[in-house]
Amino acid sequence: MGDKKMQVIKRDGNIVDFDQSKIEIAIGKANKEVKPSLRASKEDIKEIVNYINELDKKRILVEDIQDIIEEKLMEQGHYELAKKYIVYRYNRALIRKANTTDQTIKELIDGESEYWNTENSNKNAKIVTTQRDYLAGITSTDITRRFLLPEDIVKAHDEGILHFHDADYFAQNALHNCDLINLEDMLQNGTNINGVMIEKPHKFLTAMTIATQIITAVTSSQYGGATVTMSHLAPFVRDSYNRYLKKYKDRKLTSEQCEKFAKEDVLKEIKDGVQTFQYQVNSMTTTNGQAPFLSVCLYLGETEEYKYELSLIIEEILKQRIEGMKNEKGVYITPAFPKLLYVLEEDNIHEDSKYYYLTKLAAECTAKRMVPDYISEKKMLELKINKNGEGNCYPCMGCRSFLTPYVDPTTNKGKYYGRFNQGVVTLNLVDIALSSGGDKDKFWKIYDERLELCHKALKLRHERLAKATSDIAPILWQHGALARLEKGESIHPLLHGGYSTISLGYAGLYECVKYMTGNSHTDGGKGKEFAIEVMQKLNDACSAWKEVEDIDYSVYGTPIESVTYKFAKCLKKRFGEIKGINDKNYVTNSYHVPVFEEIDAFSKLKLESDFQKLSPGGAISYVETPNLQNNLEVVLQVIKFIYDNIMYAELNTKSDYCQKCGYTGEVLIDDNLDWYCPNCGNRDHDTLNVARRTCGYIGTNFWNKGRTQEIRDRVLHIDNKDV
């Protein structure tokens, strides 16, 4: 033997000194399971220990030691004992895999888990409804890891090579990611909620109330975001107007009086309907333990017949969102939901446009409440071309995931509402770069291997959902939210042919490119060229898979809220800390310009528009701004730039509130990543109302250390002067 003691590499990667007593204990336990005459003697055990010692290895795997024990016992003629040892070894493996949830559940309930306390900035882990969802999620994750996913996927997930999203919902084959709810079908043709028939409403207020009930039921039957559009509610404004008009005509009033009073009444009903909608959406709790993760589309171009009525709804929604919602202290603050999606078009983008007044109202709302976000009809029509050669404009599902263009075979027109996403697996681009050591040939080889691993994981998502029938969520599949299938009918056909998408996510393009080229992907030269190559490879892979399987794989700029921190920790563990690459507690979201890189708003949006084209399954860009409530002209100029240059973007403003001193403005983050009021120094999260953009949507329940550092590092992309 050498001077140094042999070391053992355990299953978790930790290295410990060789301890022969553990072998003696293990064989001793197996000895007790056989007759005395069949047991190994102390000399037999010593012989095995000596053999292992005499190997004179510096390091040895624990599995190799166990293999040697089995072989030596059989060589000694202890066949029955060897069998018992194998069973013992197998049972120990089961024990290691079993009961993995106990400690996690205890930490959640005791409020001691950093992960669960900051897993979702729209969920409060202290509340019983959220805890109930998380408890189910912990169990689902455990089942997923032990029984549903192969070891290579679990290992890659744990090491941060990829991220298998929403494992806490994967155990149920019934759940999908996000969708566009077909409110038009459900309201016009009726629906069914919890076995209760809901017939077509005859007035706007009733339609808005039913819409919130539908939204809650739908979002309780999925785990991602959902979007509805107000154009589906506009016809009911006319119904209400006609009812009021008839009432006044029956009273024999003049035509002028009838129209005047009917209009006053319908405007009051719109105000009440929008208020009902906003209160319901924010006060209801889904089975996910949070308010419905909802976006609302405001798109005048979706209807010609009811455009006027729609404009009245949009105006009222913007006015009420500008006002905000009262917190427990009765102070108006920025609510997280619903997210508003305002579509920019010829009818509202120019000063002389008919509905430009709505865009000015939207700018005021953005400056104060961070929404709406902006979709450019002009750019979307250029990018989303269906098989008929027609450009289509439609909202995202939730915060940033977009459906691919699709033509309904029954109408030969584009169809979007009623479609959905099957799920997401995200590839860590930074890990590929660091694994290659900077060697380009090695990089592309590893990239191919990792893509196929993601493909394997995505197919598992698809295959699990393919087992579902319409009975598992009648509101979705039988009563119009996504389909009108028969009872017991399989949803499998809706997973093929482009009706739904499945998403290949990606993270850390900046760090990947920086490591491989020495440049940022914002350089306009070799950095950007390499970044485009990396992005194109994602798209080529999705196209190849789709061609073979008829499944609509799509490249998705993932909103990695908690994963940004997980990936960063994994990269440090695997590669150490590399300055300028993985020396922070986060990796950069998707294709974004890194938050700390100085760049003006217009250059940022223009640059990122090139990458949005290569992220068709989901993407959003943003610019970070100071308080612009007194400088709306700047907001409007940014909005107009978005219309001409990029498909989907948002402005990140700040409107926080300290309940202790009444301060309104920006709550700050110190060097220890702790939030504090700059006016009174308050650090109590329970009395600080903070709203920040988190990967496309607004979070209000604080974040993990990685995301908090990312928020702190954000530089302003626009100043508070005229542009």
Image: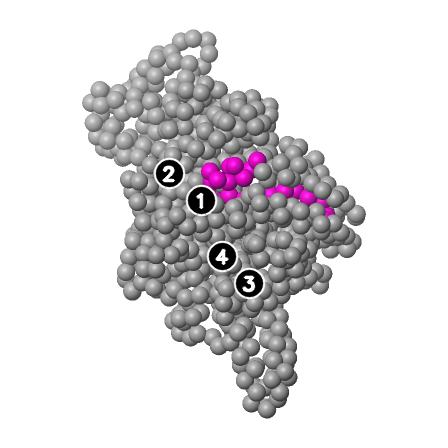
How packed mark 4 is, by other alpha carbons closer than 10 Å (few <14, some 14-19, many 20 or more), is many
Q: Element type at marker 1?
A: loop
Q: Which mark is residue 281?
A: 3
Look at the image and give the residue range highlighted in magenta.
Answer: 607-628
Residue corresponding to mark 1:
617
Name the kind of residue labelled 1 in the image.
Answer: Gly
Q: Earlier in the sequence, mark 1 or mark 4?
A: 4
The image shows residue 690 at horizontal and vertical percentages of 67, 50
Give the Cα separation between the discs numbered 3 and 2.
36 Å
Residue 300 is left or right of residue 493, and the answer is right
Q: Residue furthest top?
A: 2
Q: Earlier in the sequence, mark 3 or mark 4?
A: 4
Residue corresponding to mark 4:
227
The image shows residue 261 at horizontal and vertical percentages of 63, 81
Q: Element type at marker 4?
A: strand
- Closer to viewer: mark 3 or mark 1: 1
The image shows residue 687 at horizontal and vertical percentages of 70, 53
Q: Element type at marker 3?
A: helix
- Closer to viewer: mark 3 or mark 4: 4
Name the kind of residue labelled 3 in the image.
Answer: Val
Name the kind of residue labelled 2 in the image.
Answer: Cys
Residue corresponding to mark 2:
542
Q: Earlier in the sequence, mark 2 or mark 4?
A: 4
Q: Are marks 2 and 1 in contact (CB under 8 Å)?
A: yes
- Above or below, 451 against 697 in this view is above
The image shows residue 448 at horizontal and vertical percentages of 37, 28
